[in-house]
């Protein structure tokens, strides 16, 4: 009885995660990593509606948003 409740909860969570991932994926057109000259790092360019949503919500330029998220 307890095990079946546990598995139902896992199934419900997995379903929610799948839904969220699909929604976020639909907001991203492309993620383009580009090597930074002279550094062992990548610049991350994000294309799609998600970048516009983040820029509008934070009122910051794109490069600043990616820096805040830990991308260089």
Image: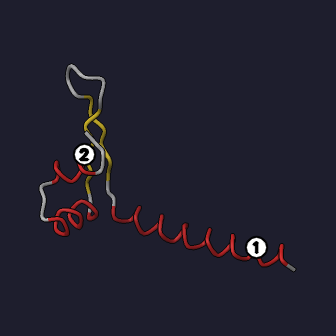
The crowd level at tag 1 (other Cα within 10 Å; few <14, some 14-19, many 20+) is: few
Q: Is residue 15 left or right of residue 28?
A: right
Looking at the rendering, in which quadrant would you find the C terminus?
top left
Label ID, residue 6: 1
Residue where numbered disc 2 is placed? 45
Residue 9 x %, y % = 69, 75
Residue 62 x %, y % = 16, 53
Report the front residue among 35 and 57.
57
Quadrant in the picture for residue 7: bottom right
Q: What element does badge 1 sit on? A: helix
Residue drawn at (51%, 71%), measured in percent from left and top?
19
Q: Is residue 59 left or right of residue 25?
A: left
Residue drawn at (25%, 54%), measured in percent from left and top?
47
**Total labels drawn:** 2
Which residue ends up furthest to the right in the rendered image? 1
Vertically, is 72 above or below 14?
above
Q: What element does badge 2 sit on? A: strand
């Amino acid at each position: 009885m307890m095990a079946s409740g546990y598995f139902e909860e896992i199934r419900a969570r997995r379903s929610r995660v799948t839904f969220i991932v699909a929604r976020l994926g639909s907001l991203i057109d492309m993620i383009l990593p580009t090597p930074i000259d002279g550094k062992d790092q990548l610049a991350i360019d994000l294309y799609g509606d998600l970048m516009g949503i983040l820029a509008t919500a934070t009122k910051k330029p794109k490069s600043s948003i990616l820096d805040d998220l830990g991308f260089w």
